[in-house]
Image (cartoon, grey):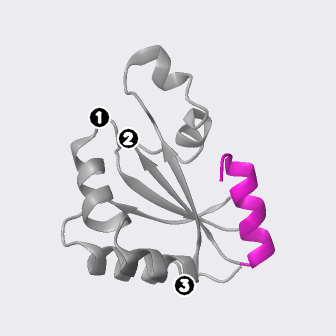
């Protein structure tokens, strides 16, 4: 999805929570590690796709004006995300249900945490 609104609409249609990943894959070491060790793994994609509509808010830079000019900056403010990477699960109204911050342990740790947090019904 190109926009949060499109992803939220799809979540409403599919009656699933929306899982937003706030990340900075071009500059954030932990984000790069998450991408490589978790996000591109087929096991992760399969598990998450069954439970959520996934949306990646990727901040291309972390420098001043360009960071604030990101199309995802308002989302960052709305959900008060302070660290990258952070997953935020939201309901069909965009209300936060849970969040999962960066942690080591690979795919299984994230799948378990996300599914545990994501058991909220819409």
| 3 is higher (above) or lower (below) than 73 | below
- Would you name the residue on which mark 3 appears? 119
The residue depicted at 29 percent of the width and 81 percent of the height is 108
The residue depicted at 35 percent of the width and 43 percent of the height is 25
| 85 is higher (above) or lower (below) than 58 | below
Gap between marks 3 and 1 measured at Cα = 32 Å
Kindly state the secondary structure of the residue where label 2 is placed.
loop
The residue depicted at 43 percent of the width and 32 percent of the height is 60
Main SS, magenta region, reads helix
Kindly state the secondary structure of the residue where label 1 is placed.
loop
Picture coordinates of residue 20 (x, y %)? 53, 57
Judge depth for marks 3 and 1 and give the one in front.
1
Between 106 and 115, the residue placed more toward the observer is 106
Magenta-drawn segment = 1-15
Picture coordinates of residue 113 (x, y %)? 37, 77
Horizontal side of residue 122 vs 85, given as left or right = right
Residue 95 sits in quarter = bottom right
Q: Which quadrant of the figure contains the N terminus? A: bottom right
Judge depth for marks 2 and 3 and give the one in front.
2
Q: Is the residue under label 3 in contact with that under label 2 (CB below 8 Å)?
A: no
The residue depicted at 35 percent of the width and 51 percent of the height is 85
Q: Is the residue under label 1 in contact with that under label 2 (CB below 8 Å)?
A: yes
- Would you name the residue on which mark 1 appears? 27
Which numbered disc flags the more N-terminal residue, 3 or 1? 1
Q: Is residue 4 magenta?
A: yes
């Amino acid at each position: 999805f190109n926009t949060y609104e499109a992803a939220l609409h799809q979540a409403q249609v599919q009656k699933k929570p929306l899982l937003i990943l706030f990340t900075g894959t071009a500059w954030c070491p932990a984000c790069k590690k998450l991408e490589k060790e978790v996000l591109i793994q087929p096991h992760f994609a399969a598990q998450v796709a069954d439970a959520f509509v996934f949306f990646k808010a990727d901040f291309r830079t972390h420098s001043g004006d360009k960071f604030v000019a990101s199309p995802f900056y308002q989302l960052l403010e709305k959900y008060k995300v302070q660290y990258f990477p952070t997953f935020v699960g939201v309901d069909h109204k965009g209300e936060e249900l849970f969040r999962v911050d960066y942690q080591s342990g690979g795919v299984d740790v994230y799948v378990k945490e996300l599914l545990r947090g994501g058991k909220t019904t819409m």
